[in-house]
Amino acid sequence: MSRADELFIQNCADILKNGASDATNCVRAHWSDGAPATTLRRFGVVNRYDLSREFPILTLRRVPLAKAIDELLWIWQKKSNNIRDLNSHIWDSWADETGGIGKAYGYQLGIKHAYPEGEFDQVDRLLYDISHNPNSRRMITNMYNHSDLNEMNLYPCAYGVTVTVTDGRLNLLLNQRSQDMLVANGWNTAQYAALAHMLARVSGYAVGEFLHVIADAHIYDRHIPLVEELIARDPYPAPKFSLAEGVTDFYAFMPEHFKLEGYRAHPFRHEIPVAI
């Protein structure tokens, strides 16, 4: 059993058994037919992955790694807030007629700030510090900018990254305010594990741990039978992950540079209701 499957099963079983229901509250999200999209939810889910041992990708259902990486690069490389720069349709419902999603996600990472060493955006500052100040405890990015929230079509869910370097290993912590376990857990976990590998590669460190902190981990009411089906499955072993040799520039990575060898995953042919 892969570590990603193990933790997904544990987290979902805990939410189904012990999660608090918001069915009696006035919830923001709704289904396409207008019904409120209620959840079972748990506060403060923390998952730890040793990336030197295996890559955390679900086998209970297939995660389309190339598409997940494409979104990651859209945010972290292109620093874009326009879906026309994205090779999938996952953001279509949040975009305006120009393709924009407001001052969200990549837009925030691309804003330049003044430092004693010069002007950097958040990504370039992080890359600079990993290379020049690896003992720093200030290697942080944050997309949750309160002054711009009213101009974001969706508040950032996975919003904050902290990086540390210890004993020659690069570790990454992801803070996420909210996560739809069925739709987003496998996706976000694979993305930010990949980001840790990217940062380790370009800075010359070995990859270390990935810590995923989820403030509100939830399962939507109409997702419950689908989640129950998933966690009843027998997982496969984790695949072997690799990055293309020779790529050492953060901005040179492309989706095809991320490889999974021996990735076996169960098919998942259900249409997943989307809460909006």
Image (cartoon, grey):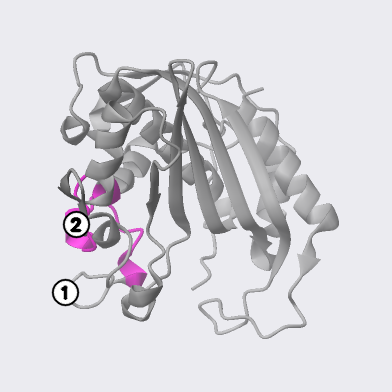
Q: Is residue 271 left or right of residue 94?
A: right
Dot 2 or dot 1: first in sequence order is 1
Q: Residues within 10 Å of mark 1 (few under 14, many from 20)?
A: few
Residue type at mark 2: give it. Answer: Lys
Mark 2: which secondary structure?
A: loop
Mark 1 lies on residue: 98
Indicate the quadrant containing the N terminus: top left, top right, bottom left or bottom right: top right
Q: Position of residue 178 (x, y in %)?
A: 56, 60
Q: Nearer the viewer, residue 216 or 120?
A: 120
Q: Nearer the viewer, residue 121 or 83?
A: 121
Q: Nearer the viewer, residue 116 or 265?
A: 116
249 over 169 or under it: above or below: below
**Residue at 49% across, 16% down:** 167
Magenta region, residue range: 74-94
**Residue at 27% across, 28% down:** 132
Mark 1: which secondary structure?
A: loop
**Residue at 55% across, 47% down:** 185
Residue type at mark 1: give it. Answer: Thr
In the rendered image, which quarter is residue 248 located in?
Answer: top left
Mark 2 lies on residue: 112
173 over 198 or under it: above or below: below
Q: Residues within 10 Å of mark 2 (few under 14, many from 20)?
A: some
Q: Position of residue 264 (x, y in %)?
A: 51, 23
